[in-house]
Amino acid sequence: MSLFLEVVSVSEAVEAVRRIAPLPGCEEVPLEDALHRVLARDVHADIDIPGFDRSTVDGYALAAAETTGASEAIPAMLQCRGRVGMGSADVGEISSGACRYVPTGGALPEGADAAVMIEHAEQIGDDVLIHRPVAPGENVVFRGEDFGAGKVALERGRVLSPREIGVAAAVGADRVSVVTRPKIGIISTGNELVPVVETPGPGEVRDANSYLAGAFVTERGCHPVYFGIVRDEQAMLKRAVSSALDRCDAVLVSGGSSKDERDNTAAVIAELGEVLVHGIAIAPGKPTIIGTAGGKPVIGLPGHPASTYVVLVAVVDHLLAAMQMTTVSRRTIRAQLTENVPSTRGREDYVRVSVRNGKATPVFGKSGLLNTLVQSGGLVQIPASSEGLEVGEEVEVILW
Amino acid sequence: MSLFLEVVSVSEAVEAVRRIAPLPGCEEVPLEDALHRVLARDVHADIDIPGFDRSTVDGYALAAAETTGASEAIPAMLQCRGRVGMGSADVGEISSGACRYVPTGGALPEGADAAVMIEHAEQIGDDVLIHRPVAPGENVVFRGEDFGAGKVALERGRVLSPREIGVAAAVGADRVSVVTRPKIGIISTGNELVPVVETPGPGEVRDANSYLAGAFVTERGCHPVYFGIVRDEQAMLKRAVSSALDRCDAVLVSGGSSKDERDNTAAVIAELGEVLVHGIAIAPGKPTIIGTAGGKPVIGLPGHPASTYVVLVAVVDHLLAAMQMTTVSRRTIRAQLTENVPSTRGREDYVRVSVRNGKATPVFGKSGLLNTLVQSGGLVQIPASSEGLEVGEEVEVILW
């Protein structure tokens, strides 16, 4: 069995993970717990919103026609027939030559089709002088104008920001159907790894990748399920991956920084399912493996946390988005490069940069250093077709 | 008691809320629960990271000096003294003329100060031909080079992204001290309001603001505490605000869309503490109240959800950030306006826009419509000094 497949481009890798993303389930949650979830079903307005013609100002409800030609010099004069109470069902009616005071959000009386702001009127006893004309519908939201009864207020696929949560509340959706959070199994492999609570001995390092990948998938709306550190031994890794596949919707195996270990991960995936990609033309992050087993994605991430993070951002992000019926939305800014950045044609390079006052400064030094992750503000992507970027060039920075 | 204070600018309002923000407490949480929390104490490296000189490639560990002048034509020849195992304490030693195979992440033997990539070497039996020179330190991370023992790895005040979580794991911080999540009391007031589960009668609307504000403060790392709907009656509102102040670090009172209601909120704050700002030169959102009671901020938000949201973004966001020892970090993009947008000098206007292909199109129509919140992609701020923006102008869009 040859595992030495061709190295694929980043876009091919992204296509591959989107293709193998399993379809998500859905569940109903209370609206107050739905922040940042993805809508699985449209939310409809149960009734007309608002349910009545409503003033958007403090002022006088009236028939717009009564104000035709009104001005400071020659105001229209109307008779005030009292006030509309907030939330009151008794809005009354106005006849020709009459108006009623209405607070912001109050209901318009029968016969009114506009409201005049209090600032443009003057009340003298029961008389109200209107100093400027209003058009029909001015300062008013009509019944059903915001959302019509039975109409779609929020479409499925929307990520529920606070604004969508507010709209859902307004249309009476105290529970919403959302995409189930994918469960992502996280395994770290490597004989050099010790748990975070331990002090590494000679040749050993702590397992940072489990935390890094776990926090990343959490940030992307998924549930991490941790399977701990597995020694670099094929039978043990196979058992761990099988167990993670049983309990999760996808599995990330990080580690395998050395060639032997990488081959081990690939061999386990091949035994349990199929290796689709073995190596991506990306730097850092080349030794990435994409496979499936039992209809679930299994991704082999590079061993070094800095490389792992680039692959999480450049490739795995798309998998997690697809598993939630959505697409990756990136925070980017444009900045000017302060130095030349060489690159190798045929490989997509991701350069860590710090960003300050519109300038992007490459965080050079050794790419294997973990501290570059927290000393940089984002990534600049250099396309595979480019031999590098030049100082002064405007680049797009993918903010971390 | 006059509550008709001067309307203040947005920047004065922001300054006011930052000034009254109570200092946060701190708590220790397990690292896996610390995502997006704010570090309250520096995180130090407990030991040198890495704890040993480490290869960053699969290749041969050697003394760089041995490769001086090496080339394809005249390679340097070294004797291979076996392999370094991953995580192994037994790294051995190399003497003059010798090297050892080392996997990525493996420890360098005594006497080695660099590694040659396997691609640049050729092993024939026990002999290894090195085809190019390496410099001391090449392809190696030295002991303590990433983080020195006892040094600060992450400074307090940092928001813990997945990358900081990974670094904390690497330096052994399985628990971290973070800023306590502020508890924000949320009250909706208004006689027209009914709970989301109810069908509004004539003149009534559902309480969208509690959900909107609750989701907003959650998104900003705070805990919302809901105190429900309070009728527009001073004694009842005072009781609700007092009770919220007892249990929370700050209180948001939304509603009071009409002048009478606004005055009611202001009167309650004045009774319990002090009104600092009564009206902001912002549109929408002018009738915003900023006060304190018992050393805690109390903010009166406008009644209409669309106005409330603008005030949450423009002002309250700064309060919540200050209460967590941090500052507002906004997602913005630059886009070209597709239409003229008039504005009134002396007032900061926030215009909802939809963004597509670098173009920002104002979502005009009635600003009182809730659906503008979900049909727009962000806000364009028009400074108080401006009389409007012109079609074609490049503007910064604060993405929702």
Image (tube, coloured by chain):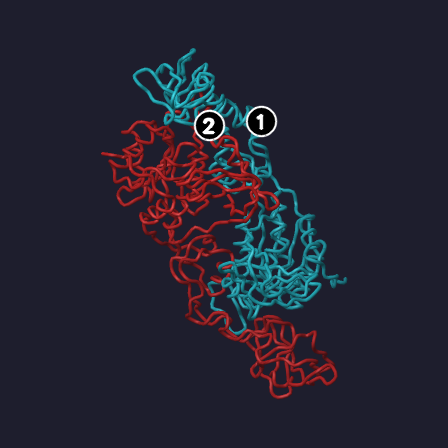
Chain colours: A red, B cyan
Please tell me whether residue B100 is drawn above or below residue A279 in the rendered image. above
Which amino acid type corresponds to the residue marked 1 in the rendered image? Lys
Which residue in the rendered view is the most extreme toward the front? B73
Contact? badges 2 and 1 (CB < 8 Å): no
Q: Is residue A193 visible?
A: no
Residue at image mark 2: A197
Residue B133 badge? none
Residue B151 badge? 1
- The image position of residue B202, as x and y in percent, is 52, 74
Which residue in the rendered view is the most extreme toward the top? B95
Which amino acid type corresponds to the residue marked 2 in the rendered image? Val
Please tell me whether residue A400 is drawn above or below residue A234 in the rendered image. below
The local crowd at label 1, few if under 14, some if 14 to 19, many if 20 or more residues have their Cα within 10 Å, is some
Q: Would residue B384 be found to the left or right of residue B191 on screen?
A: right
- The image position of residue B314, as x and y in percent, is 62, 56
Q: Would residue A276 be found to the left or right of residue A201 on screen?
A: left
Q: Regarding mark 2 in the picture, which secondary structure is present there?
A: loop
- Between circles 2 and 1, the one closer to the viewer is 1
Q: Nearer the viewer, residue B265 or A202?
A: A202
Please tell me whether residue A187 is drawn above or below residue A166 in the rendered image. above
Given the image, what chain letter belongs to the residue carrying mark 1? B
Q: Nearer the viewer, residue A197 or B362?
A: B362
Q: Nearer the viewer, residue B130 or A169?
A: B130
Displayed quadrant of residue A1:
top left
Q: Is residue A5 visible?
A: yes
Q: Would residue A29 be found to the left or right of residue B124 on screen?
A: right
- The image position of residue B64, as x and y in percent, is 46, 19
Discs 2 and 1 share one subunit: no
Q: Marks 2 and 1, how far apart in space?
A: 18 Å
